[in-house]
Amino acid sequence: MSPTSTPASTPCPAPTAPANVLSIAGTDPTGGAGIQADLKTFGALGAYGMAVVTAVVAQNTQAVRMVSPLTPELVQAQLEAVFEDVTVAAVKIGMVANAGIAEAIAEVLTRHRPPFVVFDPVMAASTHKRLMNESDLERIRTVLLPQVSLLTPNLKEAARLLGIAQPVDEAGMHACLPALQALGVPNVLLKGGHLADDTPDAPESTDLLATPEGVIRLSAPRIATRHGHGTGCTLSSAIAALWPQHGLEKATRMAKDYVHGALLHADTLQVGHGRGPLHHFWQAVHLPGQLA
């Protein structure tokens, strides 16, 4: 090799573009739930986040003060603006608010067919304020659920969707799964965290993931914190962000691990005087260099 020659360089593989993940949900001006939590979660897990607002919600860590749904036409216009311009890898749906918005979402999803659609059926805030009209549930069941790939209800939401009493044990959770799948959703993640309301000393929180292949039991140690505002939003958003790359089961396990860490570090935040939010960026702060 001559002094002026340079060795042939090995070409670097082209970087993989982040998945484009869309949140369709309501707002939370204090940032713990809804669109704001979804976008934080997408970013923390390496996805490119997009957002379509269904309702403007005046809430904080203590209470929901006012809810103003957008018109179905405006929700549909936002959705069309995204799908006409961007390849969407996954969709997460949160607060739908009413039947008209459910129909608008379903119509767009039917035409554009994103590969993964996760629906967290937000019916009440963690402060117990109802965010969805009971009279609209039937249209949500019949129109929107058949467009969904994964439904992620907690026990109260599952009971309302099915019109039954809330399950009180794991056997009752198992009994709900076939009926939830019969609503037209192939995959259901039934979250069992509310079982702890009756057994606060339970060491674990157990969720059940039902797929066409069977049921997978997923448990995690329970964390003693009052700061869990937005836990459901964050879990479903994490699954949506991870599903395109990892598949459903692995994405769900990874999402639960992420939420576990976000809850574990929630007390390091100082946000509000009520039920505070999770620490969505705990990995960047506490595990530098370990983000994917």
Image (cartoon, rainbow, N blue to C red):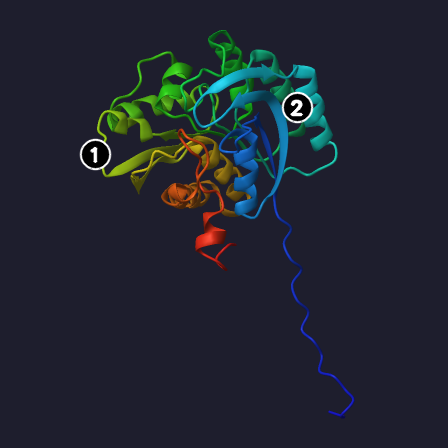
Is 43 placed above or below 104 here? Answer: below
Looking at the image, tell me whether mark 2 or mark 1 is earlier in sequence order: 2
Q: Quadrant of residue 5?
A: bottom right
Q: Of discs 2 and 1, which sits in the foreground?
A: 1
Query: Measured from the top left, where is residue 241 in percent x and y?
Result: 54, 41
Q: Quadrant of residue 74?
A: top right
Question: For numbered disc 1, what is the local secondary structure?
Answer: loop
Q: What's the CA distance linking mark 2 and mark 1?
A: 45 Å
Name the kind of residue labelled 2 in the image.
Val
Label of residue 201 in the image: 1
Residue placed most toward the observer, 65 or 245: 65
Name which residue lies at 30% across and 35% down: 206
Is 47 placed above or below 273 here? Answer: below
Question: For numbered disc 2, what is the local secondary structure?
Answer: helix
Query: Measured from the top left, where is residue 264 in percent x and y?
Result: 36, 44
Q: How many numbered marks are there?
A: 2
Name the kind of residue labelled 1 in the image.
Asp
Residue indicated by mark 2: 108
Which residue ends up furthest to the top in the rendered image? 135
